[in-house]
Image (cartoon, grey):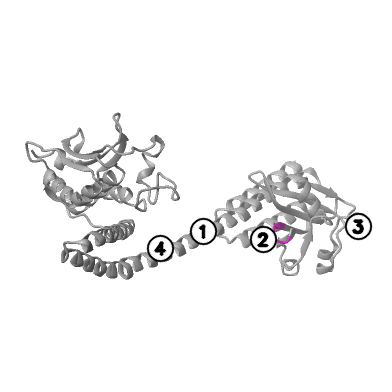
Amino acid sequence: MKPYADYTLRLERLLDVCRKSGDKLSVDAYLQEIVRTGAELTSSTGCSILTYAEEERCLRFVAALEGEIDALRGVSVPLDRSVAGWVYRRQLGLVTSQAEADARIHRVADRELANGTHALLAVPMFFRGRCVGVMEAVNKAEDYTEEDVRAVELLAAMAAGAIENQRLLQESQSACEQMMAVDRMKDDFLAIASHELRTPLTAILDGLEQAAAANDGQLRTTLGPAVKAAERLRSVIEQMVDSDRLEKGLGQLQQSDVDVLELVNEIAAGVQAEAESHAVRLVVEPVPFAVFCRLDPEKTGMALHNVLQNAIQFNQPGGEARVRVCDGETGVQICVEDTGIGIPAEALEKVFTRFYQVESHLTRRHGGMGLGLAVAREMMDMQGGRIWAENRAEGGSRFTLELPHAHGEAHF
């Protein structure tokens, strides 16, 4: 009965160590518990855990019995002149009861502990199929058994999981810190864009417009492109600032019952000059009745403005951008159709991603930073609406903005 009793006690001890993996122990404390258990279950005078140090290409002690780890922590174990290195490189376990004559034994650890190694059990530590280190038990009075090997292998697996989970957590924290640093840099840049660029740009634009308005001749013709370029730059800056505000959740909804066609006409009037400069005909189809919907007029207007700009910029001289208001099955829809270049099928969803450009930044002929449609989607999402793109069979593209009916239905 004694072998069964010993086997039961061994299992209970292993289960106890396994349970402690869920306790609020530090990794060092948990590894200390593992080596204590390893020494106890194998009746060894010593037990240790070594992990691979990639930069130094050697193994280093990360855990040992109390009173030994301080002496061993600074010891590096080479891969080519040690049992631990042999086990790590070959990913095979090793048991020897004649360690005094084994040239592979690394004697530096013995000197540090003023102790000799006469018996040793070493197994590789695996995590998701990758060897991350070696666990050793040393100096059992009797020969190591298969039960000893299995116990150390189980403990090595627990140690590998704890070590690698800590490494992954540290990498995740490091990546998070880097992302936060990048985010702070972006915030600083946007602060500059919203103040240091926008304020002087407004003054420049006002001066150009006044100079152009005061002269009916060659000066107005000369200043026209400069005014358009300044307006385009201001639009890009505004989109960047709007996108950042939305990302931080600073845009609060201000909803009310709005005549959708009236809002559409207002936004279309705001981009009429840009349409004319691109030689694009802008058409708003009339509706024989008023269509009211509960929405945020500023955010909906901004979304529509960005979609209309897209329809104009990616059109062709003599082309057309047409806006239609209709009642869909689940909400009021604003459809913007154009006769432009269309969108590759694989990019129909990607165009709503921030900074995405269908064309290469080296060859694209059209302006913008890839923020307009991303902002439009965010504006719609905030209101429980949606926006999608599709290509028209006759050429060009169609963007549909849909807002849910107020209280389940639209008012006509």
Q: Amino acid at mark 4?
A: Lys
Q: Is disc 2 in contact with disc 4, using a CB cutoff of under 8 Å?
A: no
The mark lying in front, picked from 1 and 4, is: 4
Q: Is disc 3 in contact with disc 2, using a CB cutoff of under 8 Å?
A: no
Mark 2 or mark 1, earlier in chain: 2
Mark 3 or mark 2, earlier in chain: 2
Quarter holding residue 408: top left
| Residue that badge 2 annotates | 32
How far is the residue under mark 3 from the one under mark 2?
A: 27 Å
Place of residue 135 in the rendered image (x, y in percent of width and height, measured from the top left): 73, 53
How far is the residue under mark 1 from the one under mark 4?
A: 16 Å
Q: Amino acid at mark 1?
A: Ala
Magenta extent = 50-56
| Residue that badge 1 annotates | 175
Q: Does the magenta portion include 214?
A: no
Mark 1 or mark 4, earlier in chain: 1
Return the residue nearer the eye: 8 or 149: 149
